[in-house]
Image (cartoon, rainbow, N blue to C red):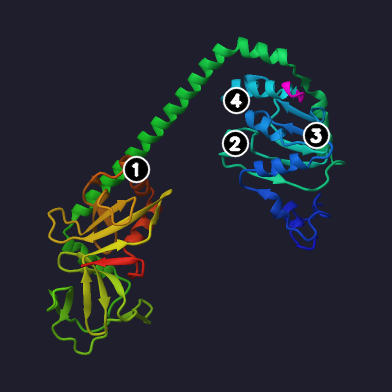
Amino acid sequence: MTSDGQSDRLWGSGVASPWKTHCVGKSAYDEFVAADIYPKWKRHVAAAAESVRVYSPYLDRLAVDLLGNSALGPENVAVVTDLSPESGPFDYRGQLLAIRRLISRGIEVRSLPRLHAKVLLVDGRQVTLGSQNFTSYGRRSKETSLAADTDLGASTFVRILNEWFDEAVLVDGDLVDRLLERLEQPMARAREAIQDLINSFGDVERSYRSEVVRRRFEEHLAQARLRSPAEALRAAASKSRFSAGQAVAWAHLDWVESREYMSLLLADNRGLDLTNWRSPDGSNVRLEHLKFYPALLGPDGRVAFVRIAESRITYVWRGVLWGAPQRIGPRNLYLQDTFLDGQEDDANVRVEFSWEPGSQDGFGLRMRFDGEAALPVAKGHIIGHPYWPDILRNTVMEAYEDAESWDGVLTRISAQEVRGNVQVIS
């Protein structure tokens, strides 16, 4: 067991870890990388004192640039790859051109059939290995690597790498030139076929996802139209986990004398405390005095943000403008919620998504929130002239496609209370 107590756990109970001496004072987990490993490759190559060797089935100009960081002479640098196109690189021509550049610099290149390892071996003892290929494409992929500083010079692992190197066949420039000349047309046809395959995959995937979204949207439309807002409101109230636990009080919504905002005026408060609610377990839940909370107003189910006082509900706001961007899928969007009433389609919420705060150009959805779910009542539509309208629409609808992601969006729309970065709209 090492001083940090982690090495044995990495390798399993009773299994001796080859990192035991190295991991004293340092977590072995630090050597595992789930990110682009190129920066570590670059540092290790630059620090090499004796030799650098790359094992990779796929390589391109990135490998040439990487090995250019070595201060060693070209005779101390080597690459082992699979020269055959059978291993299936997308751009075989790019691999051949990279090999030709390496050879022109005096770097030894060898070919080993069925090589699939991706390893950087420095000074015959320091190993970096993982899933990442020595290509520019690999830097943009989700890759995992193990970057160990341990001296593995005497290990079976390095011994086998050396055996592979001896087994590999030396590649010369004339062979590469002949391959480039002879295989140009077959490679062009292969690239075209692979691109067709990629395009077809994208078309099928987009079509499938679009169909999934359409079916889910239509199901939600049907649910939203199944019952009236008043019926939905009563159903939500009957299923509510909380109740005021006090006498019924009647109130009406009206403008205050200044007409700056609306207030829900109680006909007779009879000592009610509207900040005091009862939970299913019998305990009391206290709302914060004079804080804003989302509310459904009967009988038509209008949504509003209301400020809760002990004896009355004041400041009934018709909308919310979010001052900070909200994460929707992979992008940050600004939201503006308008609470509707008296609409023919029974919508009580209109949500507008835009690239900039307060923008009049965006993508809008009309929905009805009934206390249980917020369901669309009409297809989304572009508002004004936003830039990248298709990307904006797709960002919102892709979030809608994933139920969990869309629940996160709805949570932002119906936040627990209005905070400092939210502006209420009268």
Mark 1 vs mark 2, CA separation in Å: 27 Å
SS at circle 3: loop
| Residue numbers of the magenta segment | 104-109
Q: Magenta includes 140?
A: no
Above or below — where is 180 with respect to 126? above
Count the numbered circles shown. 4
Q: Earlier in the sequence, mark 2 or mark 4?
A: 4
The answer to which image quadrant residue 161 occupies is top right
Q: Earlier in the sequence, mark 1 or mark 3?
A: 3
According to the image, label 4 marks what residue?
Answer: 89
SS at circle 4: loop
Which mark lies nearer to you, 3 or 4?
3
Residue at x 15%, y 53% (from the top left corner): 345
According to the image, label 2 marks what residue?
Answer: 138
Left or right of 241? Residue 129 is: right
Amino acid identity at mark 1:
Asn
According to the image, label 3 marks what residue?
Answer: 72
Mark 3 vs mark 2, CA separation in Å: 25 Å
Residue 139, horizontal then vertical, whole percent:
59, 38
According to the image, label 1 marks what residue?
Answer: 394
Q: Earlier in the sequence, mark 1 or mark 2?
A: 2
Q: Residues within 10 Å of mark 3 (few under 14, many from 20)?
A: some
Q: Earlier in the sequence, mark 3 or mark 2?
A: 3
